[in-house]
Amino acid sequence: MVAAVLVLLMALVGPVRAGEQLRVPLECRLGQGPWLPCAMEVRKIGEDWQLVIGDRRIGFRHDQRGAIRMRQPGSGWRQVNSRWIESSSLCWDGVCARGDIPLD
């Protein structure tokens, strides 16, 4: 499902050229914490993006076969599951984003 959503993102915003980056303002939540202002920065649509929450950057990579890996500050890459929850929030193992996510 996430792969299809990322393909839809590509259709909505068009290609991101080398050296360019799409930045989308959102709200993010870590675990059960409060919703905070954040941004999704897309480096390579469908493959490489990050969430910027304050001074924290959480990286994501999609292998185009359905697997998504996430890297939080101070840790290595690990595979995560993605799912949609209430209020159109997209979550990856406890890291959630909501707002005008250009994925849906």
Image: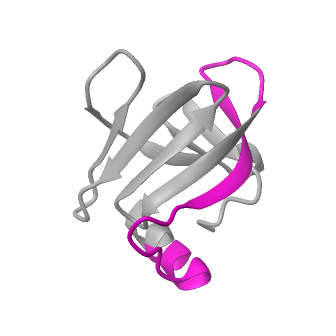
Dividing the image into 4 quarters, which one contains the N terminus?
bottom left
Q: Which residues are magenta?
A: 7-36
Residue drawn where x is 60% and y is 49% of the image:
40
Residue 72 spot, x, y in % from top left:
41, 25
Is 47 on the left or on the right of 5, as rendered?
A: left
Residue drawn where x is 55% and y is 52% of the image:
41
Is 84 on the left or on the right of 60, as rendered?
A: right
Is 76 on the left or on the right of 30, as rendered?
A: left
Q: How many marks?
A: 0
Residue 29 spot, x, y in % from top left:
67, 29
Q: Can residue 85 be seen from the camera position used here?
A: no
Is 21 on the left or on the right of 62, as rendered?
A: right
Where is residue 97, by image quadrant? top right
Residue drawn where x is 47% and y is 80% of the image:
15
Residue 47 spot, x, y in % from top left:
34, 60
Residue drawn where x is 73% and y is 47% of the image:
26
Q: Can residue 8 be seen from the camera position used here?
A: yes
| Rendered position, 50 above or below 16 | above
Where is residue 81, by image quadrant? top left
Judged from this view, the residue extending furthest toward the front is 19
Magenta span includes 28: yes
Dividing the image into 4 quarters, which one contains the C terminus?
bottom right
Residue 12 spot, x, y in % from top left:
60, 81
Question: Is the image coloured rainbow, by chain, by secondary structure, or in one colour?
Answer: one colour
| Rendered position, 5 above or below 23 | below
Give whichever of 77, 22 is nearer the camera. Answer: 22
